[in-house]
Image (cartoon, rainbow, N blue to C red):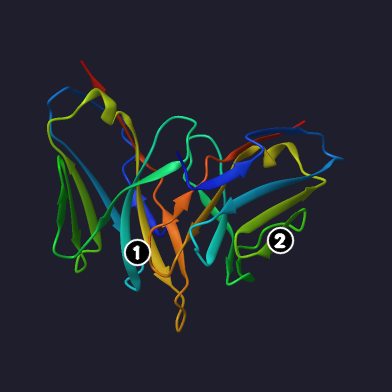
Amino acid sequence: DTEVTQTPKHLVMGMTNKKSLKCEQHMGHRAMYWYKQKAKKPPELMFVYSYEKLSINESVPSRFSPECPNSSLLNLHLHALQPEDSALYLCASSQDSSPLHFGNGTRLTVT
Amino acid sequence: RKEVEQDPGPFNVPEGATVAFNCTYSNSASQSFFWYRQDCRKEPKLLMSVYSSGNEDGRFTAQLNRASQYISLLIRDSKLSDSATYLCVVNIYDRGSTLGRLYFGRGTQLTVWP
């Protein structure tokens, strides 16, 4: 069982759709992350929120828009994605220098 | 140059074998180090942190050599359930920040056969 919950588990969307990925943790962690992972590749950092403020954006295209409504929630809004954006999207959280706790991920397919 | 370099394998070993994975990192400012395990189509899960003095958790031993910027993971008495991809992870802190960026190696694939 993971303490970081991601929904949905699977998502299929067209290139003109708007959708959102959701992530929730109740461990009191103040840093939350979005990672993208393609098949047979390591996770790649997209965004980091620290104390609900965006701290790191790894030059992610604007068709990905993160949002942190409160300390427990992290969203990733998707709009006008491309087929090459199909991947496993992982949310993670941590406190200070502790290791990351990952959610189960959302497997996204863009058609 | 990648922040973390890792031999992708695959490593195919029989049950009971001892296997070692290695990883090098390029940024000397790296401050914390981890091994994660990832099963097929699942999320990465923390296997163990890596400390300068070396640390052991059951059949798993992790070593860190800061001078050589090298991390290793040793698995003794391999089990079928050890089959997975093992990811070397390095945490680099921005100057003056308590927030780090985790960089993942590409992962080493291990298959343990009966």
The chain under label 2 reads A
What amino acid is labelled 1 in the image?
A: Ser
Do the dots labelled 1 and 2 sit on one chain? no
The image shows residue A84, relative to residue A94, as above or below, that is: above
Q: Which residue is mark 1?
A: B26
The image shows residue B77, relative to residue A50, as above or below, that is: above
Residue B46: horizontal and vertical position, in percent?
Answer: 35, 48
Residue at the top extreme, as displayed: B114
Q: Residue at x 40, y 32 (%)?
A: B39
Task: Pick the residue in front: A69 or A60.
Answer: A69
What amino acid is labelled 2 in the image?
A: Glu
Asked if labels 2 and 1 touch by Cβ distance under 8 angstroms, the answer is no
Circle 1 sits in a helix, a strand or a loop, which is it?
loop
Q: How many marks?
A: 2
Residue B22: horizontal and vertical position, in percent?
Answer: 24, 48
Task: Pick the residue in front: B74 or B46.
Answer: B46
The chain under label 1 reads B
Quadrant assignment for the C terminus of chain B: top left
Q: Mark 2 Cα within 10 Å, few/some/many (few <14, many 20+)?
A: some
Q: Which residue is mark 2?
A: A67
Circle 2 sits in a helix, a strand or a loop, which is it?
strand
